Structure formats: structure tokens, C-alpha cells
Image (cartoon, rainbow, N blue to C red):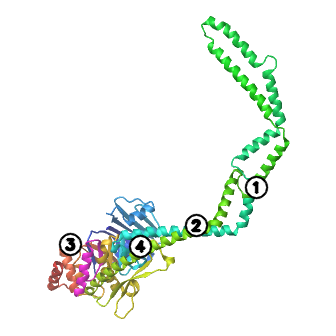
Amino acid sequence: MLQTLSIRNVVLIDKLDLDFQSGLSVLTGETGAGKSILLDSLGLVLGNRAETSLIRHGADKLSVTASFALPKADNPVCRLLAENEIEVEDGLIIKRTLNTEGKGKIFINDQPVSVKLLREVGRCLVEVHGQFDNQGLLNPASHRGVLDAYGSYAALLEEVKNRYAEFKNARAAREQAEADIERAKTEEDNLRHWVGELEKVNPVAGEEDELVRRRLELMNAEKIIEALNHAYGILTRGCDVQSALRQAQSAMYKVNDMVGGKYSEIIDDLEQAMIEAGEAVNAIEAASENISLNTGELEEIESRLFALKGLARKHQVGIDELPGVLADFRQKLSNIEFGEEGLNKLRKAEEQAKLSYIKSANELSAARKAAALQLDASVMSELPPLKMEKARFVTRIEKTDEGSWNENGFDNIYFTVATNPNSPQGSLNKIASGGELARFMLALKVNLARTSSVETMIFDEVDAGIGGATAQAVGERLSRLARDVQVLVVTHSPQVAAKGNNHFKVEKSTNDNVTTTTVRELCSNEKCEEIARMLAGEVISDEARAAAKVLLSA
């Protein structure tokens, strides 16, 4: 909800600060007083184009600041700002400036933002109906969401969304399988050749390290044997290690009793050393016997390493990855041989998912058609009192082709109108005039208020070309609408003005050849006097004042 609007140096406005309340606020004043300037100013903080012609004569820049209350914790504007990392706590403050050089700045809660983001935020905050550009209900892209919200079939919408996701995934799986099989068929000969090459070599994961180790051993076999024999000789010739350890142990036995067994641990260590020395001797002997001097084995290892490295280079992988490459090639050949069977299963799954989606989407279409008939009837019932008894409002629902199906079903939805009995149905913004459009919007909004996330609506020229009972009907519907959302209306109709909870008068004055527009909120007596002026003109009669009181009490 719009709370405050501060304007500096915009056309005829020097300095203006306004406070707004909930309910219906009306703005009145003589033609040319500057009511449009207020809307232009508000339009700046909603993302409308900023032009230097809006800067007050003699000023170097303009600025407009608006604050909004956001009572709903989870609302579109909060989600939008969160996506753009803009913090929102108690409310929203939007400020926009523009200098005479055409350079401007935009801030939302003191953070600089782009015009694009401001425009998106503005659409979430305020709907303006009348002389402004297409937005809200005037955008056909919004009509599906509006009808769905009006119809209150959220569970069915969720069902269609889930069924579409299943259908989409099933279709993607089938398409991927078809592509894989087709790609595999084009390289089948190569695959069979590669499989043959790899199977001939039969690579084993981890064998490269073992082959390299074994090759190094064979290449140095003579040196290794020499070293082993030398070690064996050292341990076994002359006074060998085991004999020396045994003699040492015997000596310790002789004195151990003399010290009360104090050397028992040393004797045990010597015993263990003899055992380990014996094991070492045996191990060296065995190692020496196992060293091969077979040059043929070395040649075989060299040949295998060469073959493995060649295959690894060919397939651009490491040697240890070759078994995986072979498995992959075998799988591709298997897919070719048995792929049609699997593909048929995927096709059946896709068809089943498609039928489930169609069933749910048809149920959604039926619900939409029922909601559309209800909405059409409700809007049509509002038109005769608004002096549009010959107009027709029709919600068109068209089924799209399969290529356009999505998670929202397969319906294109448009709100269409015809202002005359023999004229064709067309889009709202192309068929209706400014005043008719505003009244169409009013009739729609009265019915859609409970479903809208926008909490502020502005109507301009809603009373164009009407008066009397029609204007009274417009005022009543604006008042009804204002029970659910904040409504601001620029009006020349006393019948509409009388319905306002808050009344602002726009005035223009000239002092020292300087013209200034001001706005002030009227008290009860002033409100009555202003409505009397709207009824009588420049000279306010007692009869006009009496009529104004009647309107205010109605």
C-alpha cells in the first residue's frame, strides 16, 4: 500500500509531501490544475520513462520518493527483491532523481537499482488504469494467471505441473536414447574394431604399475643377484650373525642368575634377534633363487607396455582407464543390438506420461472454462450500471498445439471485449477507449480484488463522459473495491468524489509570475464545499451545498 509520496521540482510542483491511507482516496481539481503531474510523479517511482521536460523550470534536478507498506510476509515484490539481494524489513522506500543532463539515479531501500528492476517492482506494487501504458490486466500474458487465481483450483494446477514434469522427463529420456542409438549405429564398425583390439590386449586395471616394477627388476637382475649374494655371504661366512648372537646369549645366561634374573630381557632380545637373523638369511636366499634372468620375459613385458600405451594414446585415456573404455564400447554395441527393446519401453513410458498429462490438462481446461463463464457473467452484470450495457466481455480459451504445451496446461487465455453489439471481440487495450477501458478495468477488478497481489490501484478518467446514475455506480464500485485494496482515483465526478474516504484537492496558483501546483487533504467541511463546487461550478450556490451533503450521506 502506498503510504507517502514526496515530490520535488516536477513541472509545476515545487515541494509536495502527501500521506495516503487505506480505502478510497479521491483527487479532484480544476482542469489543468496539475492532477496529471501527480500521476506522472508516481509513474517515475514505478518505472515509467523519465524525461528532462518534467524538471521544474529553474531547477537543476527533480526527485520523487514513495514509501509502501508490505503487510503480507510472502508477496511477489518481496520475492523479487530477495532475488536481487535487496533487504526488505518494515517497508519499501523508492527514490528516483533526474538532472537536467538526463542523468538519473534510482534507489530501493537505499540500494541503487536499474530501471528494469524498478519497473518490475512497480508492477507488483501498483496498477494504473486509464491513460497509462499497458500493464496488469492489459497485458494478455497475465490473463491465464488471473483466471486461475479467480477459479481457485490450485490442487489441479499442481497436478498438471507434476504430470508435465513427468512427461517432459520421459520425452527427454526417449530422445536421448534415440540419439545414443543413432550415434552408435554410425560408428558400429569402428566400435567392433576397437573392441577387438582391446579384447586382444585385455587390459587389467592397475597392471601398469606392476609391469613397470617387473620390468625394472628384470633389467637389473644381475645387479640384484650380486647384492643378495653379498648380503648372504656377510651373514653366513666365518663367524656368522646367528653364531655370534648365540655366543652372546650363552654369556648372558652365565651371569643372569648372579643378578637375580636382571638380564632375562636381554637374553630374550638375543633369542628374537637370532630368529629374525635366520629368517633374513632364508629370505635373502629365496629372493636370490627367484630372480629371473629370462630376457624373453623382459621382451614380453616391454611389448605389453608398448601395446597398452598405444591403445591409451589412441583413445586419449590413461592405461588404467582402458578396461572402462572396453566396457563402454561393449555397452554401446549392446545398445545397438538390444536398444530397440529398451527404446520401445521408453516410448511406452513417454506415451503413458503424455496421456496422464493430457488427462490432467483437460480437467484443468474444464475448470478454466467453468471459471471463465462465472467471471464473464460477473463482469457483464457490472457493465449496465456503468453505462456499458451494450458491451460484451468474453474470456477466450484456446488449445495450443503440442509444441506449446507447458506446466500450465495447453490453454491460451485472453480477456476480450466488444463495446458495440456488431463489433468483433478484441483485446482490452485495442477496443476500448480511455474511459471505457477504465470502467472495464473497474468491473474486472471488483470481481478479482480477492485474488490480486497488488495492493494499490489507480484509476484515471474512470468517469470520462458519464454522470448521474452512472457516475454513482462507478463510485459505488470503487468503494467496494477499496474494501480489499487501496484505491486512488482522479475524478471530475462529484458522485465519485463523494465516495472517497480521503479527499485531496489539486490547486494551481500564480505568484510573481511563478505558477505552482499544490495538493492538500480536505477536512469534512472542505470536502463538502469541493463537491458543491464540482456540482455548481465557479459560483457555489446553497442548492449545490445541499446536493453535496446528500451525496456525502448517500
Q: Earlier in the sequence, mark 1 or mark 3?
A: 1
Please tell me whether residue 237 is drawn above or below residue 479 in the rendered image: above
Left or right placement of residue 375 versus residue 183 in this view: left
Tag count in the figure?
Answer: 4
* Residue matched to label 3: 523
Label 2: element kind: helix
Element under label 4? Answer: helix
Which amino acid is tagged 4? Ser
Residue 60 visible somewhere in the drawing:
no
Which numbered circle lies on residue 342? 2
Q: Quadrant of residue 29?
A: bottom left
Query: What residue is rendered at 55% in x and 68% in y?
Result: 345
Indicate left or right for 272 with 166 as reference: right
Residue type beneath disc 3: Cys
Q: Residue furthest bottom?
A: 422
The kind of residue on which mark 2 rests is: Gly
Name which residue lies at 39% across and 79% down: 138
Q: What separation in Å lies between label 3 and label 4 (alpha carbons)?
A: 57 Å
> Where does residue 68 sit, x and y in percent of width and height?
34, 66
For disc 1, the marked residue is 200
Whether tag 1 and tag 2 are in contact, CB under 8 A, the answer is no
**Does the stretch in magenta take in 515?**
no
Crowding at dot 2, Cα within 10 Å, few <14 / some 14-19 / many 20+, comes out as few
Which numbered marker is on residue 360?
4
Q: Position of residue 451 (x, y in %)?
A: 32, 72
Residue 38 appears at what percent x and percent y?
34, 75
**Mark 1 vs 2, N-terminal side:** 1
Q: Looking at the image, is mark 4 or mark 1 earlier in the sequence?
A: 1
Q: Secondary structure at mark 3?
A: loop
